[in-house]
Amino acid sequence: MQTLYYIILIPMVYLAVGVFILGTAIRLIHILRDPPQPTTLQIFPERRPAWLWALHDTFLFPTVRKHQPVLWFFLMGFHILLLLLLVGHLELIADFAVFQIIPHDIFLGKGFVGLFLVVCLLYFLFRRFKSPVRELSVPEDYYLLILLFLVVIFGSEMDWARRWYEYGDMTPEDYRTYLYSLLVLKPELPYAATFSGHSFMLVLHVFFANLFLMVFPFSQLMHSILALPMNKLRRG
């Protein structure tokens, strides 16, 4: 079992990051090299500065807000909560003073950020079982949502186990030690990450996160990288 933990938590992480970086670079190169195709791209009314309005279109989803307010609510919640989780992971790398303007424990939200993110993902998943979204969905849509759900649920379970069920064997310092060792290319597993009662949650979280990173460059999730330049193009 310890060998399996090691493979998932160290070699597979480096492999996943490598596939993510290389795959994303290849996809972007192909997009830039492909000749322009006829497009039905909707051109928005010209407003200046264009880059500011492109940011507005990318992050505030005005069209979705106008036509599907419930979906807009969950989309906004999803992206805000995802940002908070990103902050939490960055705080595992180092103590950034800017993040502690409002003092808080790691992770921010006392476990409720992950809980609400799970609710958002379940909404995105189950809405695809209802017409007309069901007819427009392809298997990849379901696979990606399920994979992201598994990443989030097991990552949140680590926090819930520590905060809500008093499993204190694994602490943020254990996560920090592990993550920092990966970054400096001197990987090591802290003792608690191998032998604690809920260490399997860390292993499953990292395993599904690895899969997600490897799938990302070859999926429609690339829109998250291309959304801003596309909106800038629409704005002129």
Image: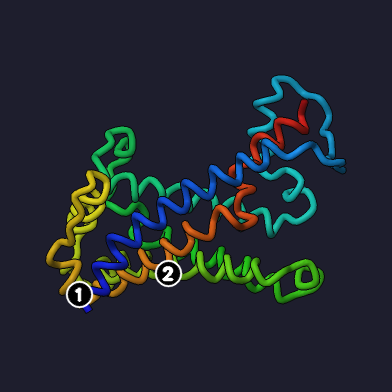
The residue mark sitting in front, 1 or 2, is 1
Mark toward the start of the polypeptide (1 vs 2): 1
Q: Position of residue 21 (x, y in %)?
A: 47, 46
Q: Which residue is mark 1?
A: 2
Q: Which residue is mark 2?
A: 153
Real-space CA distance between mark 1 and mark 2, rounded to the nearest whole angstrom: 23 Å
Q: Position of residue 69 (x, y in %)?
A: 72, 55
The quarter of the rendered structure image containing the C terminus is top right
For label 2, the SS is helix
- Name which residue lies at 76% across and 46% down: 63
For label 1, the SS is helix
Of 166 and 57, which appears nearest the observer? Answer: 57
Callout 2 amino acid: Ile
Callout 1 amino acid: Gln
- Name which residue lies at 31% across and 67% down: 8
Residue 59 appears in the picture as rendered? no
Q: Is residue 126 above or below residue 176?
A: below
Of 64 and 225, which appears nearest the observer? Answer: 225
- Name which residue lies at 16% across and 69% down: 169
CB of mark 1 within 8 Å of CB of mark 2? no
Quarter holding residue 14: bottom left
Residue 113 appears in the picture as rendered? yes
Furthest residue in direction top, as rendered: 48
Q: Position of residue 24 (x, y in %)?
A: 54, 46
Q: Is residue 45 left or right of residue 69?
A: right
The quarter of the rendered structure image containing the N terminus is bottom left
Q: How is the image coloured?
A: rainbow
Q: Is residue 235 left or right of residue 87?
A: right
